[in-house]
Each structure stands twice: as structure tokens, then as C-alpha cells.
Image: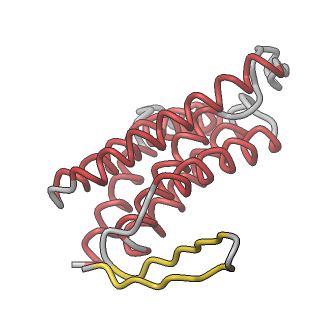
Amino acid sequence: MKKIHFRCLAALWLLLAGLSGRSGPAYAADGIETAGTALAAALPAAAGGLCLLHEDREGAVQLLESTALTLGVTYALKYAIDEDRPDGGTHSFPSGHTSVSFSAAEFMRSRYGWNYGLPAYALAGFVGCSRIEADRHHVHDVLAGAAVGVLSSMLFTTPRNGLRLSATADDGGCALHLTLIR
């Protein structure tokens, strides 16, 4: 079953990478940008699909919370900083496509494990690279977008199964708690 998930995501990537229908080096950047844009929508949809597949209402709420924070922080920074894009456009920093993609990837990793997270992170990395390749973002825009997405999901997402590590502190001291979740 683990290999099936990876193969499905790999097949999706290959399908999306060929969406442009054009061939040759003149259209290579367009195809990469199109694939990246499609994946930026597909990754959050896949995360939502996992919640449905696992009948995981708590996970769906966590996904919505992390996505809302990701979008809020991303657009607040875009309008507060208003950096020019490499192609001459505005509102470059941070990359929204990248932030949403990495938010979904971190959600899948944190909630359902590395079997889902690893291919999702690879696809999110492709999204970031596609934004640079298409001259829509600078490298630092993509890195900042990835950081916003990952940190947003880290704040809201708890593992569905496995070990959960938490910490507490008060005037009397501090403690680490390790809980097995089934």
C-alpha cells in the first residue's frame, strides 16, 4: 500500500508535467509553470482527500486552520513588503504557490507520516522550482513561502497515529510528555 501512494503521486506529477501539450525548448518553461500551478492546487486537494479517506474530521479542521494561517501570513507579507517580481510584476514576497504547497506537504507528513509526506514534499519542491524557472519569483521568495507553509502546518497539525511529543512548563518546573496515539 505504501508504494501505491508514492506511485500515484509520481504518476500525477508526470501527468501534470505534460499538460502544456506543446513541445520543444521554447515551451519548456510554460509547461513547468503550468505543472507547478496545477500541483499548487492538487497538493491541498490531496491533503483534503486524505482526511476524507481516513474519515478524519479533526485532521480536516487542522488542514483548514493551517491553510488559513498560511494564506493570511503570505498575503499580509505580500502587501506589507511589495517586492517586485523578476518578470516586473509586484507582490513577489513570499511565493503563495510555494507556501500553500509546503503547508499541504507538512500537513500530510505530520498527520499521516512520511509515506505521504515525502512525495508531497518532493512535489512541493517542484512547485517552488517552477516559480523560479518561470521568472515569477526570486529564490528567497520561494524559501520564505516554504517556511511560512511548513511553520503554519506545524502549529496546527498533530499526528493521527504514532508518537506525540509535547512539553509543559510552570513555576514548579517543566516536563516532556511522550504519548502513543492509536
> Image height check: is 158 above or below 138?
below
**Viewport quadrant of the C terminus:** bottom left
Left or right: 120 in relation to 45 = right
Q: In which quarter of the image is residue 144?
A: top right
**Viewport quadrant of the N terminus:** bottom left
User: Which residue is at 56% across, 37% downward?
Assistant: 70
Give the number of marks: 0
> Image height check: is 163 above or below 103?
below
> Image height check: is 43 above or below 164?
above
> Image height check: is 87 above or below 8?
above
Q: Where is residue 156 in the image (x, y as percent from the top left)?
A: 48, 52
User: Which residue is at 74% across, 16% downward?
Assistant: 79
User: Which residue is at 35% across, 48% downward?
Assistant: 15
Q: Position of residue 76 (x, y in %)?
A: 69, 23
Query: In the image as oriented, which residue stretches furthest toward the front?
Result: 172
Q: Position of residue 93 (x, y in %)?
A: 77, 30
Q: 160 or 172, which is in the foreground?
A: 172
Q: Where is residue 63 in the image (x, y as percent from the top left)?
A: 39, 46
Q: In which quarter of the image is residue 110?
A: bottom left
Q: How is the image coloured?
A: secondary structure
Left or right: 10 in relation to 134 = left
Q: 81 or 141, which is in the foreground?
A: 81
Q: 90 or 60, which is in the foreground?
A: 60
User: Which residue is at 60% across, 82% downward?
Assistant: 175
